Image (cartoon, grey):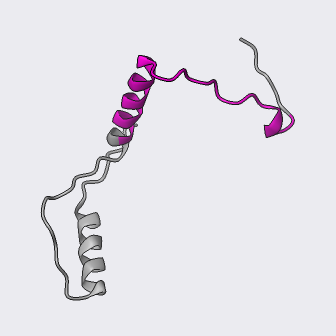
Amino acid sequence: MGVRKFRSVEEMPGPSRRTPLDPENLRLALGLATLAHGLHPLRLEAGVRKFRSWDEALESRAARVRARPQASAKT
């Protein structure tokens, strides 16, 4: 398969259309969701938090972000 060059984005072909209700669509969607979770997993804690001020809420959120384990770089 050769390399095709385009002078502008308008000349490029659009993405291929997927047929509705195709089981392959679900497989692709689940694969993308798994990839997204693997790149940046969300760890949510159950419960409701109440704060006395907006600043206190922002500080709590910043503390949770700092406490998240960082993704290790694979090199």
Along the line of sight, which residue is nearer the eye, 5 or 12?
Answer: 12
Q: Residue at x 33, y 41 (%)?
A: 37
Tell me where residue 49 sits by quadrant. Answer: bottom left
Q: Is residue 15 magenta?
A: yes
Q: Residue 18: where, in percent of width, then height?
A: 56, 23
17 shown above or below 10: above
Tell me where residue 69 sits by quadrant. Answer: bottom left
Along the line of sight, which residue is nearer the eye, 32 or 5?
Answer: 32
Tell me where residue 21 sits by quadrant. Answer: top left
Q: Residue at x 23, y 75 (%)?
A: 60
25 on left or right of 3: left
Q: Residue at x 54, y 20 (%)?
A: 19
In the rendered image, the residue lying farthest to the left is 47
Q: Residue 24: where, in percent of width, then height?
A: 44, 18
34 on left or right of 52: right
Quadrant in which the N terminus appears: top right
Quadrant in which the C terminus appears: top left
Q: Is residue 58 magenta?
A: no
In the rendered image, the residue lying farthest to the right is 7
Q: Residue 66: where, in percent of width, then height?
A: 27, 66
In the rendered image, the residue lying farthest to the top is 1
21 on left or right of 45: right
Residues shaded magenta = 7-36
